[in-house]
Structure formats: structure tokens, C-alpha cells
Amino acid sequence: MKILFSLSLMLLLLVPYVYAGKDIQTYQVPDVKNDFCGVDIDFKYCKCAFHSEYCNELNLDSEGAHSHVLTEFREWNRKKIQQIAEACLRVDGSWDKDSWTCTMCTDGDIREGTKCVPFEKVDSEVKECKEAMKNIKNDWIKYSDFDDRLGGEVSYEVQQFNVTLNEIADLVARAHQIKYDMAIEAEIRLEMREYKTALVQNLRNNITKAIFRLAWVTYNTVQGGRGTAGSVQKMLSPDNVVEGVGATMKVVQAHIPPHEKALQFNTASTTGKIGSIAWNATLETIESVANPAEIAKQGMKDIKVAIAGGPDITDEEVAILKEQHLSNKAIDEALAVSYAESATKRIELLEIENRITDKYNLLQEWKFKEYQRVKDGLENQCKDKG
């Protein structure tokens, strides 16, 4: 019952006056006894204030109760005025805070300040302002500095957005490089296991193919000997094994073509893609602009297909390889180094991904600040145009 009464009261608080092209409604202060007492305040306070009843129960005298009722009524009345003013502005009305009057345009007229004029007579700038403010949430981007044509002349907010975006691109590129390296290392570990199996089973042909593939990948296709490639290079280096194996490895290396395609991940493509999708991209989209693990696997697959065989090695050389790489646990040590390096990379990757999340959130903050700047600017331009 109280809810229905309050809704009805809100409708009655504005007294309407209808003119051609406009609807003017003025707020009338409600009656304390009829509209406030017993509705939004305990009736006992009003009974005490106006009739000296229930005062003992409230532990108040009539004067104290009267003061309490009026204080509560003023605050209640202030909130009513605020609600009505906000409701007026939401329907594009003009609110006069001195007279508590809301003026709304009707019959298709457009408000210019406190005036209502036919749409065809509205100034073109006023029309543009009306349209811009009406669709600001969807169209604000076209009024912002997110425009390539502006070159370097952009707002501070957009400058910081671009700085943050570049930082994200660098971090994602680094994350992709780590994922790529880890995938390559995982593939090389598979090659090492095949090589170990061939040694254990004394499969000379398989030994030749496996060690040739390992040498091909680690010496000719992976930049800088990173990670597992570095540990395998150390295992296969002629300078780190006995003379017999050294000679064998020199033979293997001599058969590797010097200008084969390198197994590399192009981080430039990552940064370029991020720049083109970042505006509306989610964090998940930004982080998935490339699939470095699949690229690594495909690159290794292509190389394996390209390697038909390997150089001939003797049974004596196979025996030396078994001694150096199997009995002395060189393969197991290289695998252990690989797993340790991958664990370190996983930690680094997690740290980078956390930083990417923080930077992405910052990116959204700068985007919102640019929106707020544009919105405030339009409001300032349009405030004198109705």
C-alpha cells in the first residue's frame, strides 16, 4: 500500500501547464501532515509534534518531536526534488532549480536552452549536438583522437593508450617467443629420445638419421643456440667429445646445407596484428593472435620431411657414440637441462602473462578516459546550443 501511495504521490508532485510545443511542470511542496506523516516517518512523531500524543513513548516533548519531523521532511523533500530534476533531464527537459520547473518540448519541437522551437528552425549546429549527444556511447569514437589521419597530434589519453598498446605488443611478442622456444625444445626432446632408443637397440640406420636431424636443427635452424638447442649443441660439439666422435660430428656437420630456412618465430607479425585488432579486442584475442606452438611443430615437421637421410658412419663410430652419449648419460643430462630450462621459461611466461593482464586493464582505463574527454568536450560545446 505504501509503495502504491508513493508512486501516485510522485505523479502528483509536478503540476502541469501545457503550452503549444511545450509541457511545463512545476514541483509543489507536499503537505507534511497528509503526504509525509505516517508514510515516510512513524506517525507517532507527528502525533507528538502536532497533537502532543505518544510523546512519553518516544521520550520526547512536542517541540523536540516537531523539530525532528521538520528535519526529516526537509531531507525527504530535497531527495524528491533531486529525483524529479534528474528525471526531467533524462527526457531532455530543461530544469529550473529556482522555480523547481521542468520544461519539456512536445509536438516534435526541439529544445534550445529553455525554448522549444520547430525542428526545421533548429540551427544546424544544434541538430548536430543533439544527434551527437544522443548517440555518444556508440559514436564517440568518431569524435575522438583515435584517428590515424591525426598523426602525432592526439590527446594525452590517446598517447598513453598507444604507449600501453606498444608495451602490450612487446610483452605478447616475448610470450610468443617463449612459447615457440618451449615447443621447439619439446620437439628436440622427442628427437633425443628417438636417438637414445636407436642407440639402445643398436639400429645403425636410425642412429644416423636421428643424430643428423639433431645436428641439422641445433646447428643450422635455431638462432643463437637457445635453450635445449644449446644443451644439444654442447652434447654434439666435436670439441666436447673424444676424437672418434668429434670426427663423426664433423662428418655430420659437413653434410648440413649451409643456407637452410631457419626455425624462427617472427615477433614482428605479432606486434602488427595486435595493433590492428586492439581497439575492440578482448585480452584473450590479443594473446591469441598467433599460435607459436603450432608454428614450431609445423617447422620441425617440414625439416624432418626435408631430411632424407644422413652421412655414412661406421660401426666403430656408432660404438663411440653409444659410449659418449648413452653410457656416459650425455642424452639424459641434456634432457634434464632441457626440462630445467623449460621450467624456468614457464615461470617467466606466467610473469609476462600477468603483466599483459595489468597492461590490458590499463589500456581500458585510457580508452575510458578518452571517452570521458570526448563526452565532456561535446557537452561543453553543446551546452549553449540546447
Image (cartoon, rainbow, N blue to C red):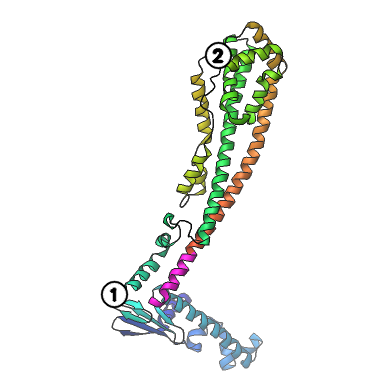
Image-quadrant location for residue 57: bottom right
Q: Nearer the viewer, mark 1 or mark 2?
A: 2
Q: Secondary structure at mark 1?
A: helix
Considering every residue shown, the one lying at the far left of the view is 120
Image coords of residue 51 (percent x, y): 57, 93
Q: Secondary structure at mark 2?
A: loop
> Which residues make up the magenta segment?
372-386
Image-quadrant location for residue 87: bottom left
Characterize the local packing of mark 2: few (<14), some (14-19) or many (20 or more) Cα atoms within 10 angstroms: many
Q: Amino acid at mark 2?
A: Gly
For label 2, the residue is 310
Which numbered tag is attached to residue 287?
Answer: none
For label 1, the residue is 119
Image coords of residue 328 (percent x, y): 73, 17
Is 231 in the magenta?
A: no
**Would you place residue 151 above or below residue 229 in this image?**
below
**Would you place residue 33 above or below residue 208 in this image?**
below
Give the number of marks. Answer: 2
